[in-house]
Image: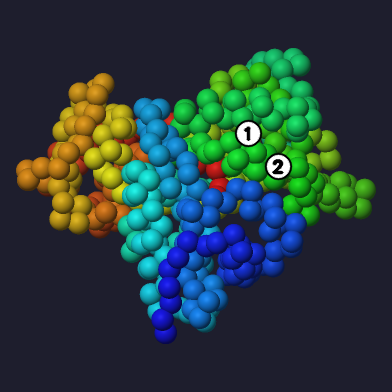
Amino acid sequence: MAFEISIPTEEQWPELMRVDARGFGWVPSDEITAKRRLIIDLERFRIATDGGRIVGVAGSFAFDMTLPGGTSVPMAGVTWVSVSATHRRQGVLTALIAAVHADADDRGEPVAALYASEGGIYRRFGYGAATTGRRVTIQRIHAQLRPELTVAPGAVQYADADDIAPHERAVWDRFRRLRAGEVSGSEVWEQRRFMHYAEPDEGYTPGFHLAHADGFAIYRIKEQWGTGFPSHELFLEQLVALTPQAHLDLWHAVLSVDLVGTIVTRVMPIDDPLVHLLVNPRALSTAAVHDGLWVHVRGPGVAFGARAYGSADRLVIEADGRRWSIESDGEESSCRTVRSRPDLVTDGATLGSLLLGGVAPSELVAGHRIAVRNAATLRRADVFFSTRPAPHCATFF
């Protein structure tokens, strides 16, 4: 069966929205279709058509991704990837991904990244799992902060969403530079992200906004009144803190919300210090740990040359038959093609796992993703690629 890949037109937008939503198991309203159009640059999207009907979709958002050391590079945030059930195993997905990658290359974006709806799809397209995602549950009744900790009185206040939006955007732009893997988008994307919090979502209220001079938090509530023992669920959408004191102050406010039984979030980094602030650390439990952001390094020379490293060293990595010398003197870094004997041998997808420093080379060697010259080289590589804090991305796209 023949199909064609093309850039969607404005007239095809409603059909594109319906086809993609169907692929993910839901039906969009006219209102949602209109709102989603505000953040979509159709020039960054590709559709597969068969007989004039859309049978597959893929696209990307324009972001800047933070790398270890605080620098950033342009990134294609790949999204909306779906193929109709009637057109599976016909090369549609491969053609769509290739078209989106070619568009990213034309735009000079050395990195592509995505969140995978299923974990077994994207390695074959060059993506490696680069960050860890987790879902956290906090039993509020048991979650008391250690009494010797000092919370700044009046540091956190409730705020109207429209009033606090400029503050949240400014804080976010500073915050995302503090952790590898986080991204910044266009003004239109930021506006849509904060508009989302104003809408009810899956039984939860619109977002409540907490303001701090050095941060903010956004949460929703799902009412669960019970029989005289209210136990609402608080879903924490964002908790963004530029300093340890802001982190403490904001968590104090969140843990103080009345009528709450359980706090749930999926934006907490794996190394978040909240567990160390609690009298009973078991009040916080990790309900699930899974892959987070998947990264595809389109331009290794740019991407690996832009990040900082944990030691002054030089390592040669061979990926899919091409060799790259990655070198750092502790201040400046570089990455260039060479013919030297490789220290590590792997594939392009594993470069994505290495870029942000969230997966140690020794872990990848043990997982049979990397072959290494010797044990001493592996110890050097672990130190070289390491970064703190752990990479994380709380921006879903």
Say if residue 277 shows up in the picture: no
Please indicate whether residue 256 sits to the left or right of residue 103 in the image: right
Between 371 and 237, the one nearer to me in the picture: 237
Quarter containing the N terminus:
bottom left
Q: CA distance from mark 2 to mark 1?
A: 17 Å
Q: Residues within 10 Å of mark 2 (few under 14, many from 20)?
A: some
Q: Which residue is mark 2?
A: 195
Q: Which residue is mark 1?
A: 239
Q: Quadrant of residue 156?
A: top right
| Residue at the outermost left position | 340
Mark sitting on residue 301: none
Query: Given this view, does label 2 or label 1 mark the residue nearer the observer?
Result: 2
Between 257 and 242, the one nearer to me in the picture: 242
* Position of residue 143 measured from the top left corner of the image (x, y, whole percent): 69, 35
The amino acid beneath tag 2 is: Met
Q: Quadrant of residue 161?
A: top right
| Residue at the outermost right position | 228
395 up-or-down from 14: above or below? above
* Position of residue 381 measured from the top left corner of the image (x, y, whole percent): 22, 38
Q: Residue at x 47, y 49 (%)?
A: 77
| Residue at the outermost bottom position | 1
* Type of colouring: rainbow
Count of all numbered marks drawn on residues in the image: 2
* Position of residue 312 measured from the top left corner of the image (x, y, whole percent): 20, 26
* Position of residue 199 measured from the top left corner of the image (x, y, whole percent): 76, 47
Q: Residue at x 65, y 43 (%)?
A: 192
274 up-or-down from 300: above or below? above
Say if residue 92 shows up in the picture: yes
Please indicate whether residue 290 sits to the left or right of residue 163 in the image: left
Q: Residue at x 24, y 40 (%)?
A: 301
